[in-house]
Structures are given as C-alpha cells and as structure tokens.
Image (cartoon, rainbow, N blue to C red):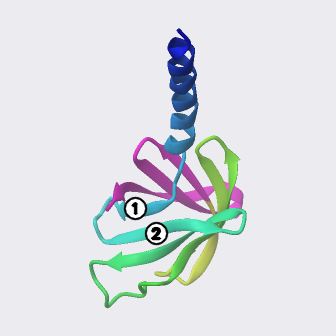
Amino acid sequence: MAIRPIITAAGLLLALAVPAAAQDVTGTWLRDTGASKVRFTKCGEAMCGTISWLKEANGPAKVGQRIFYDMKPASAGKWNGSAFNPEDGKTYSGTMSLSGDTLTTSGCVMGGLICRSVKWSRSN
C-alpha cells in the first residue's frame, strides 16, 4: 500500500529536523564553574544572552544584565557578536560555538590575539 512511502517521508523529515534543533542555542546555560546561568533568546535577527541566575549576588554581575548581544550566525553552530564582561566593565568581540549540549563562548581583544573562553552546559 501507500503507507511505506509516507513512513519513509516522515522519517526523512525527522532526520532533516534533528540537525537544526541540535544547533539551537536558545535556552538556559550553566557556566562550567557553576557560578552563573545565562538565558539565550532571539533579539531581532541575532541571539542575546542575559544573566538569569547567580550563585553569588554580591559581585559586579547582576541578574537581568545582558552579557552577550548581537550574536549572529557565522556558520553551522557558530555565532559572532559582542560579549560584555561585568568584572571589568568592558565589551569584547565575542564568538559562540555549539557542540551537542556544550556551548563555548569566547571574548577577544587585539583583533583576536588575546581570548578567554568559557564552557556552558544546558540547564533546566
């Protein structure tokens, strides 16, 4: 009957949808040190990240503070934009790369000569 082509087509559609979902950075991410969580959402055509939780609320970072902004897709699983560091009050050129449930963010100065990276994991 015609059921086999329908099942095959549904399987193909599902297989095509999985890579797109795997590259979705939207949601809440826990920093590798356990010190903070950042929530990534769409902001126009880009992604933005806002601090949603802090283990220590007495530091320079504040809940609700945007620390990643204008992060635009650069290639599959990679974004380029800006990263704000609450500790020194400076904004750096920023990149994000997603691999499975691990997000790596980097902020760079001097045209990328000096960079600092942080790893994040998906959080509920």
Residue at image location 36% in from the left, 63% down from the top: 31
Is the residue 123 above or below the residue 39 in the image?
A: above
Q: Name the residue located 50 percent from the left edge and 83 percent from the top edge.
A: 65
Residue at horizontal 57 percent and vertical 14 percent from the top: 5
Q: Magenta region: which residues? A: 95-124
| Principal secondary structure, stretch drawn in magenta | strand
Q: Residue at x 59, y 59 (%)?
A: 114
Q: Is residue 123 magenta?
A: yes
Q: Position of residue 48 (x, y in %)?
A: 59, 69
Kindly tell me whether residue 104 is visible in this rendering: yes
Residue 29 within the magenta-colored segment of the rendering:
no
Q: Is residue 83 visible?
A: no
Seen as rendered, the residue at the extreme top is 1
Labelled disc at residue 54: none
Vertical arrangement, residue 65 with respect to residue 108, above or below: below
Is the Cβ of the residue at disc 2 closer than 8 Å to that at disc 1?
Answer: yes
Amino acid type assigned to the residue bearing label 1 in the image: Trp
* Residue 89 in the image, given as x and y percentages of width and height: 55, 84
Coordinates of residue 82 in the picture (x, y in percent) = 65, 68
Q: Indicate left or right for 99 with 57 as reference.
A: right
**Which tag, 2 or 1, sits closer to the chain's start?**
1
Nearer the observer, 67 or 76? 76
- Using residue 75 as the reference point, say whether residue 12 is left or right of it: left
Image quarter where the C terminus lies is bottom left
* Residue picked out by circle 2: 39
Which picture quadrant has residue 67?
Answer: bottom right
> In this figure, which residue is indicated by the disc labeled 1?
29
Identity, as a three-letter code, of the amino acid under mark 2: Arg
Residue 100 percent coordinates (x, y): 43, 41
Residue 30 or residue 16, whichever sits in front: 16
- Spatial CA distance of label 2 from label 1 is 6 Å
Mark 2 residue element: strand
